[in-house]
Amino acid sequence: MKEYRVAIVGMGAVGREMVRILDKSSIPVSDLQLLVRKNDGAMIPFRGKEYLVKRVTPGVFKGVDLVLMAAGGDAAKELAPMARQEGAVVIDNSSAFRMAPDVPLVIPEINPEAAREHSGIIANPNCSTIQMLVPLKPLHDLFKIKRVVVSTYQAVSGTGKKAIDELKQQAEAYLASKKVESNIYPHQIAFNILPHIDSFLDNGYTKEEMKMVNETRKIFGDEDIQVSPTAVRVPVFNCHSESINIETEKPLPEVSEIKKILAEAPGVEVVDDVQNNVYPLAVNCSGTDKVYVGRIRKDFTISNGLNFWVVADNLRKGAALNAVQIAELLVAKDWL
Ligand SMILES: NC(=O)c1ccc[n+]([C@@H]2O[C@H](COP(=O)([O-])OP(=O)(O)OC[C@H]3O[C@@H](n4cnc5c(N)ncnc54)[C@H](OP(=O)(O)O)[C@@H]3O)[C@@H](O)[C@H]2O)c1
């Protein structure tokens, strides 16, 4: 069986999750390099061995088949072309290449065929886009979605390891009546809600919000689908939640039928029993792989409208898991 030499760049919140997911994946790995900017001597376990985290150095990607990048956009712009030139295929988690015409933007449950067209770089979509589109896909295929109104409730892990530490520190300081310091976000995040993720653009939206608009069109291959987003940061350690409203072109069936459609969709799990207070919750979702959907109900203000609530682990399906699933797809189809 063919084995692959793999490098993972970035050992923050996403990179470390990638190592754990790759460990359990079906990909045969003959060599693994774990790379960062400043080496701190960390050792990370993978398939029964300990691996030393090393600095990225020139020529480090020579002989590597696959590079999984979780190091941010600046690092991706510098290192992904270098890795490609040295012969590797790169799957990048940043937004650096997502909208480039020659870079496939892939969610394996939705558009696996797009990955075949890569020219050395494949982009992983934004975490909020992934968990929105996995349950929207079967509904779009059957009823053609015209418009999506989405509000996100995004965990601090989406900003990375330093933001997780900041929420802990702020919560402890606040409860001890000490001064709360904000370094990662422009305002206190503990016991607060920030209607602001990433920087503001001239149109009044944030970059995070416009990623959801543009990436949806690219992944669905539908320039007409309208997405109206509000991205919000909440004081939750991990797992993003989203309130989603859709309007479809074709009439929607009864809610019981919609639940069946969603329950059969790849990557989706319906968690919806409101009589018993059962619906998807961020605290139940960490470390899991599905996109959980609940609170499914018709929008009674329009003819073909639906409301629902979606929760997923942003570090896994929103980032590391989706990237490793793309890698598994490339290996299975021999598209590397
Ligand atoms: N967190 C999420 O839910 C999520 C979801 C989707 C996508 N993403 C994307 O995934 C990427 C990583 O996010 P994260 O949350 O894991 O961030 P993070 O916790 O801040 O970790 C970033 C890692 O990248 C390394 N790094 C930065 N610049 C580098 C360079 N030039 N060369 C090598 N390593 C470098 C850092 O190493 P040093 O400590 O040595 O600087 C650190 O290990 C980002 O592009 C992010 O937008 C994240």
Image: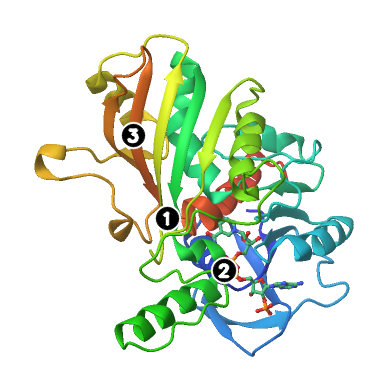
Foreground label between 3 and 1: 3
Sequence-wise first label, 1 or 2: 2
- Disc 3 is placed on an element classified as strand
Which residue is found at the position 35% from the left and 81% from the top?
A: 174
Task: Name the residue that disc number 3 marks.
Answer: 308
Residue 238 shown left or right of residue 89 in the figure: left
Question: Marks 1 and 2: CB-CB under 8 Å?
Answer: no
Q: Amino acid at mark 1?
A: Asp
Spatial distance from mark 3 to mark 1, Cα to Cα?
A: 17 Å
Task: Name the residue that disc number 1 marks.
Answer: 313
Foreground label between 2 and 3: 2
- Disc 1 is placed on an element classified as loop
Q: Nearer the viewer, residue 175 or 293?
A: 175
Q: Based on the displayed image, in which of its 4 quarters is residue 16 positioned?
A: bottom right
Spatial distance from mark 1 to mark 2, Cα to Cα?
A: 24 Å
User: Is residue 26 among what the camera can see?
Assistant: no
Task: Name the residue that disc number 2 marks.
Answer: 186
Residue 322 placement (x, y as % from top left): 54, 49
Residue 285 shown left or right of residue 62 in the figure: left
Question: Residue lying farthest top?
Answer: 250
Q: Nearer the viewer, residue 100 or 205?
A: 205
Residue 153 sits above or below residue 266 on the image: below
Question: Marks 3 and 1: CB-CB under 8 Å?
Answer: no
Q: How is the image coloured?
A: rainbow
Residue 302 sits above or below residue 108 on the image: above
Q: Amino acid at mark 2?
A: Pro
